[in-house]
């Protein structure tokens, strides 16, 4: 076995208790979730990259998972939301809500058993971005609107598996597209409270394994079950699901862009209202102060009287000459015109995004016609046709709004030009000739229409004076969730006349519906609902096709044996090995620390899905006392079995985790000395003869009948690290980055190790290669003085990296000293 040593690089304190840790699979980054619901990303040097605050009060992180390429971190919260965060700036790229507490997450990339690489095969890559209108970013931070979800560079299909506190499992392709909603129905656990402790899908996508915590009865006793789900439909249609996921991601990005654009339009419209209302409220005050003999006369009446009769009321004269002023009028007109033009530009964006949405929906509609490929996973032609029709209606409604705004701008310019001439005449000045020549009879009609449509009744009542006087109703009505008050008159349109004279056209599936009385926001809502219905059908169809092939009870835990801290109850870890062909479930069957580690794996056969599995029980009685065997030798080493009823192993399990294809990482506790130990267990040393095949019809395991094998003899001492002066809690490892982080029991201090680095420093604790005959199964440290020096160095205060760290350090050192003394 290749020799390697563990080197400590960091010993850091944190200001808030850490609840979970997870290394990035591709970069030297570790994500920490803490007790306040925050997620903090650190580099290997412990430099903080960013922090994501808790989304709400009393909400904490239920689980985390990295996308296989390490670019996206999925964070699942206890209130049911799952957020996909970009590692560069912590932006939330996508958010889904399962409405159930998230308890487990895993993100698995597809692996082809034959070793072949991914290829598009029958389906060419989407090139729609070459001919669809280019969308302008809504802010400077956006690089590409079409790829806002960061999925276009993804080749192999990858699935985010989310488990909930009510026993349900949800599958999301690329973490975005819902492609499976699985509700486990089995007579053994029916009508019982169940919770998903762990969920993992095989890398060939044929099998989903779940660890369920089921409350057996009113006593609170818990039973732990292993459920195997057949997901053959996912594996057989992985290429189709990939295309659907990419289309769904694009549509989701476009809908978010559409929502943001309408929001900006609403804000620009409200800015116009605020500016005009400020002026009109001053005009209302003038009417009150003058004690007008005509209290019911409105602003629109005064303005129309001035337009038609050429006679201005006293209040209007004072308002125009002293409050509004010529300079203020020009400034107000330019400001409102600018806001109008901004809305018009945003409407052009709406038209472009509507065309893009319509194009992608038509692609999906074409896919749904190929039933044996796409229809079997849930795409239906009817629902997608309705979505296409809704998208076309939206595009036409946006075009209608564009025409309304264009006409309103003409009316606005004519109104302010007329009002400018009126102010000059009231002031006794002659208007410029060019201004008079611009006012035609057509412009006067625009002015009259503008006054009539946009100025509301403004009375002297105190309550009514709070209402906005300026309405811009022709534009504003499109931005509210209610029917249009002034729908455009299309009765003279030749096509409208023709369609009305032929009622059969109203029921045609080839003609797009106009919906003349609906606002833009109403049409948008209809579009989103139709897309939601069309693209969430696969999650129900695939979920129904995923049936339980096996449910077996692993063990039970009486209520009185459960510790208060759920982290110490038991440990589960699931992973794939042998290029994704074998699934492993590793667990302890009691409160931690626990002496026995149970390993369940599927058989290495060509059977798909793999419904047969086997189990082994191992423990660590000693480390490195038997000479290493060749890696190719899978024979049974003599005296490797250990009867745990008569002999207790020296080490007990604190935590276990997948490291790489050949190795499992273990965090152990030395029962004789109280030290924690970080070590690596080669999977090849857990030979086939250790495993017992589980009968296919078995519904319960008898763990006590298994022979427990001592694997400590096969652990290389150079892959061990004694964690002196530390009461360890759990750890996180990364085989791709060769790093580990070990958390203290206080959850406020963490040590970081490089697991594949030469350690030339004197403070390394190494195992002695020679052991005396009296204690042949025990490994000792190299030098007592080195151990004391290393311990004192660990107790020395560290420079604080966050508020309250020095206090946390003192508390931690006191705790560890007391632990060493008592143990």
Image (cartoon, rainbow, N blue to C red):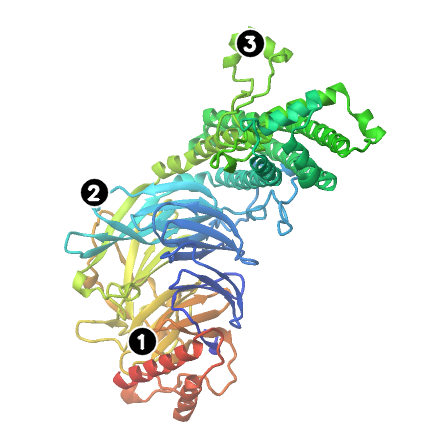
Pick whichever, 794 or 596, lies toward us: 794
Q: Is residue 686 above or below residue 141?
A: below
Q: Nearer the viewer, mark 2 or mark 3?
A: 3
Spatial distance from mark 1 to mark 3, Cα to Cα?
Answer: 83 Å
Q: Residues within 10 Å of mark 3 (few under 14, many from 20)?
A: few
Q: Residue at x 31, y 63 (%)?
A: 571
Spatial distance from mark 2 to mark 3, Cα to Cα?
Answer: 59 Å
- Residue 124 seen in the figure: no
Pick whichever, 232 or 455, lies toward us: 455
List x then y, in percent, for residue 805: 44, 76
List x then y, in percent, for residue 183: 31, 42
- Residue 219 seen in the figure: yes
List x then y, in percent, for residue 562: 21, 64
- Left or right of residue 302: residue 69: left
Residue located beneath label 1 in the image: 669
Q: Secondary structure at mark 3?
A: helix
Q: Are marks 1 and 2 in contact (CB under 8 Å)?
A: no
Q: Is residue 660 above or below residue 75?
A: below
Q: Is residue 14 above or below residue 603?
A: below
Q: Residues within 10 Å of mark 2 (few under 14, many from 20)?
A: few
Residue located beneath label 2 in the image: 187
Q: Quadrant of the N terminus?
A: bottom left
Among numbered discs 2 and 3, the one appearing first in the sequence? 2
Residue located beneath label 3 in the image: 500
Spatial distance from mark 1 to mark 2, Cα to Cα?
Answer: 40 Å
Q: Secondary structure at mark 2?
A: loop
């Amino acid at each position: 076995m290749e020799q390697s040593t563990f080197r400590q690089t960091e010993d850091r304190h944190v200001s808030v208790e850490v609840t979970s840790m997870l290394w990035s699979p591709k970069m030297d980054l570790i994500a920490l979730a803490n007790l306040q619901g925050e997620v903090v990303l650190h580099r290997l040097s412990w430099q903080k990259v960013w922090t994501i605050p808790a989304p709400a009060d009393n909400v904490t992180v239920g689980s985390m998972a990295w996308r296989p390429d390490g670019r996206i971190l999925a964070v699942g919260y206890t209130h049911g939301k799952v957020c996909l965060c970009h590692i560069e700036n912590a932006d939330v790229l996508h958010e889904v809500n399962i409405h159930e507490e998230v308890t487990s997450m895993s993100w698995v990339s597809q692996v082809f058993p034959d070793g072949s690489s991914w290829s598009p095969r029958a389906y060419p890559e989407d090139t729609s971005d070459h001919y669809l209108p280019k969308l302008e970013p809504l802010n400077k931070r956006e690089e590409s609107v079409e790829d806002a979800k960061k999925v276009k560079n993804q080749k192999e299909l990858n699935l985010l598996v989310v488990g909930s506190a009510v026993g349900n499992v949800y599958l999301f392709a690329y973490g975005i597209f819902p492609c499976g909603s699985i509700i486990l129905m089995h007579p053994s656990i029916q009508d019982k409270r169940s919770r998903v402790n762990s969920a993992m899908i095989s890398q060939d996508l044929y099998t989903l394994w779940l660890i369920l915590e089921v409350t057996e009865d009113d006593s609170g006793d818990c039973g732990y079950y292993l459920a195997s789900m057949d997901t053959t439909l996912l594996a057989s249609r992985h290429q189709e699901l990939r295309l659907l996921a990419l289309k769904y991601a694009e549509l989701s990005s476009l809908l978010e862009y559409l929502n943001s654009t309408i929001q900006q339009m609403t804000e620009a419209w409200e800015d116009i209202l605020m500016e005009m209302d400020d002026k009109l409220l001053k005009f209302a005050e003038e009417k009150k102060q003058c004690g007008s003999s005509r209290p019911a006369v409105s602003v629109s009446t005064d303005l129309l009287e001035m337009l038609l009769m050429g006679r201005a009321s006293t209040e209007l004269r004072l308002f125009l000459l002293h409050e509004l002023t010529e300079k203020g009028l020009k400034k107000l007109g330019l400001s409102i015109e600018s806001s109008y033009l901004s809305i018009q530009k945003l409407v052009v964006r709406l038209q472009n995004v509507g065309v893009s949405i319509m194009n992608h929906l038509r692609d999906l509609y074409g896919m749904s016609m190929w039933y044996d490929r796409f229809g079997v996973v849930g795409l239906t032609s009817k629902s997608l046709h309705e979505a296409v029709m809704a998208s076309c209606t939206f595009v036409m409604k946006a075009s209608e709004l564009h025409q309304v705004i264009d006409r309103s701008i003409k009316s606005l310019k004519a109104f302010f030009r007329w009002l400018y001439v009126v102010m000059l005449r009231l002031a006794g000045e002659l208007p410029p000739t060019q201004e008079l020549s611009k006012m035609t009879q057509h412009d006067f009609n625009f002015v009259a229409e503008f006054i009539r449509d946009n100025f509301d009744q403004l009375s002297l009542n105190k309550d009514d004076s709070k209402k906005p006087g300026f309405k811009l109703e022709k534009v504003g009505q499109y931005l509210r969730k209610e029917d249009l008050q002034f729908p455009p008159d299309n009765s003279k349109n030749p096509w409208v006349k023709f369609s009305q004279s032929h009622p059969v056209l109203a029921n045609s599936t080839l003609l797009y519906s106009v919906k003349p009385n609906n606002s833009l926001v109403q049409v948008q809502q209809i579009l989103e609902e139709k897309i939601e219905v069309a693209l969430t059908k696969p999650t129900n169809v695939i979920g129904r096709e995923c049936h339980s092939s096996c449910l077996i009870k692993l063990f039970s835990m009486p209520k009185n044996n459960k510790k208060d801290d759920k982290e110490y109850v038991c440990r589960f870890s699931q992973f794939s090995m042998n290029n994704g062909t074998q699934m492993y479930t590793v667990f302890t069957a009691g409160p931690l620390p626990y002496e026995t580690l149970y390993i369940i794996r599927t058989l290495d056969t060509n059977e798909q899905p793999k419904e047969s599995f086997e189990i082994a029980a191992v423990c660590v009685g000693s480390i490195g006392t038997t000479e290493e065997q060749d890696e190719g030798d899978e024979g049974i080493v003599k005296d490797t079995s250990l009867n745990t009823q008569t002999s207790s192993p020296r080490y007990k399990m604190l935590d276990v985790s997948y490291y790489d294809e050949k190795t499992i990482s273990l965090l152990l506790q030395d029962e004789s000395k109280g030290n924690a130990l970080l070590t690596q267990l080669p999977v090849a040393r857990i030979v086939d003869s250790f495993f017992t095949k589980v009968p296919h019809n078995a519904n319960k395991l008898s763990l006590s009948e298994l022979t427990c094998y001592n694997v400590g003899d096969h652990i290389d001492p150079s892959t061990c690290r004694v964690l002196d002066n530390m009461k360890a809690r759990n750890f996180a490892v990364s085989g791709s980055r060769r790093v580990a982080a070990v958390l203290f029991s206080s959850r406020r201090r963490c040590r970081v190790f490089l697991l594949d680095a030469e350690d030339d420093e004197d403070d390394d604790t190494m195992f002695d290669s020679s052991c005396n005959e009296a204690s042949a199964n025990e490994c000792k440290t190299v030098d007592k003085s080195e151990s004391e020096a290393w311990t004192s160095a660990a107790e020395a205060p560290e420079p604080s990296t966050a508020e309250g760290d020095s206090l946390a350090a003192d508390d931690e050192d006191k705790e560890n000293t007391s632990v060493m003394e008592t143990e």
